[in-house]
Image (cartoon, grey):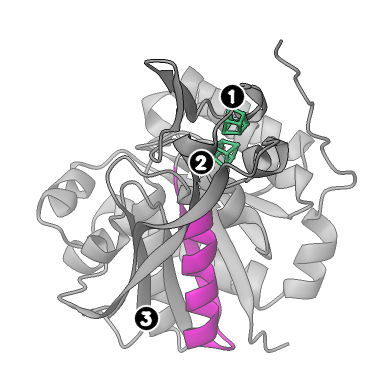
Amino acid sequence: MVINLLELVILSGKGGVGKSTLAASLINYLSKSGYKVVAVDADADAPNLHILLGVKEWSSVREFTGYVASIDRSKCLKCGKCYKVCHVGAVEVINGDYVINELLCDGCYACLVACPNSAISRVKTRYGVVRVGVSSYGNYLVISPRLDPGKSSSGRLVTEVKSVARSLGGDAIYVVDSAAGIGCQVISSVVGASAAILITEPTPTGFHDLIRAHKLVKHFMLPSALVINKYDLNEELSREIIRYAEEENIDYLGSIPYDEKVIKSLNEGRLITEAYPNSSASKAILNICNKVVTEVIESWDNWFRRYRPKRYEPFKVEIIR
Ligand code: SF4
Ligand code: SF4
């Protein structure tokens, strides 16, 4: 079956486990295999996929703007209702005046609704940019966000990046390189995706964060696959992670050995599978990429049915008083 449109999100929960290296290698492999592929960097705070994919210059840089709340002091009754409803602590009291910290405000407008004297209005602000370029390894698009320093709304910027990618890419395989953690950027990466590829390393923190990331994936009912990076640093824990994958119905795609060529290629700003294709890490990565093509993309319907979570993971709401 020919699949024209899929969105594969690469995530890990933990930073520094090889997410971008796997994402970039997979993107490049898909392009070389004849797929129309679009690379989407979904890390608005620290975008780096374009470096690994050899983007030399941006063909377009668009501002991403939104609105934040602002208080008109002349109308303010100092009732404090805006302070109470703000869930991110963006309303501050300075010398007895209520003011909004623009860097914290995420534009939910709860304070506008709460204000009894219409003292709060919306003002436009810039959050960052969405950049479009082409990889020097192949003729495929690389879409990348960049959040302005100190700005909030990274999740919305990631949603915007994905939307720009879809509008430019049309029918294609989208590979989304998610940010670390399970915060709003990662949630935006996962929303609308077809499947998740989880990558981890055999450390207690790596395993712990993998489980958290997988719970998020299950919440959105995405089928998932697993890759273990540097598996030989702790083979016993690697086996435990594979057992977890079996119990949780995650498709284990394979493991990548520790290889100094990975660090060397990163230092050189090059893609390992291009710079050192015969290294042990490259061979393992290319084998995993081949499995993504043959077992996931080309067998999509069967794979989706087999690995889709059986039940969704509810969010546990915590009320902090
Ligand atoms: S718009 Fe939302 S986040 Fe911003 S100050 Fe008002 S309540 Fe807080
Ligand atoms: S809710 Fe409105 S009136 Fe009350 S403190 Fe905030 S801005 Fe002032």
As helix, strand or loop, the secondary structure at mark 2 comes to loop
Quadrant (top left, top right, bottom left, bottom right) of the C terminus = top right
Residue beneath disc 3: 141
Disc nearest the viewer among 3 and 1:
1
Mark 2 Cα shell of 10 Å, populated few (<14), some (14-19), many (≥20): many
- C-alpha separation, residue under disc 1 versus residue under disc 2: 36 Å
- C-alpha separation, residue under disc 3 versus residue under disc 1: 44 Å
**Any atom of ligand 2 within 8 Å of the CB at mark 1?**
yes
Residue at the spot 41% in from the left edge and 34% down from the top edge: 101
Residue beneath disc 1: 83
| Residue 91 against residue 12 in the figure, above or below | above
Image spot of residue 128 (x, y percent): 34, 58
Image spot of residue 221 (x, y percent): 79, 52
Residue beneath disc 2: 12
Q: Amino acid at mark 2?
A: Ser
**Any atom of ligand 1 within 8 Å of the CB at mark 3?**
no
As helix, strand or loop, the secondary structure at mark 1 comes to helix
- C-alpha separation, residue under disc 2 versus residue under disc 3: 23 Å
Q: As rendered, which of 211 and 303 lies closer to the eye?
A: 211
Which residue is situated farthest in the front direction here? 74
Check if mark 2's residue and mark 3's residue have beta carbons within 8 Å.
no
Mark 1 Cα shell of 10 Å, populated few (<14), some (14-19), many (≥20): many
* Magenta residue span: 156-179
Which residue is situated farthest in the top direction here? 321
Image spot of residue 239 (x, y percent): 58, 29
The image quadrant of residue 319 is: top right
Mark 3 Cα shell of 10 Å, populated few (<14), some (14-19), many (≥20): many
Disc nearest the viewer among 1 and 2:
1
Image spot of residue 26 (x, y percent): 43, 66
Check if mark 1's residue and mark 2's residue have beta carbons within 8 Å.
no
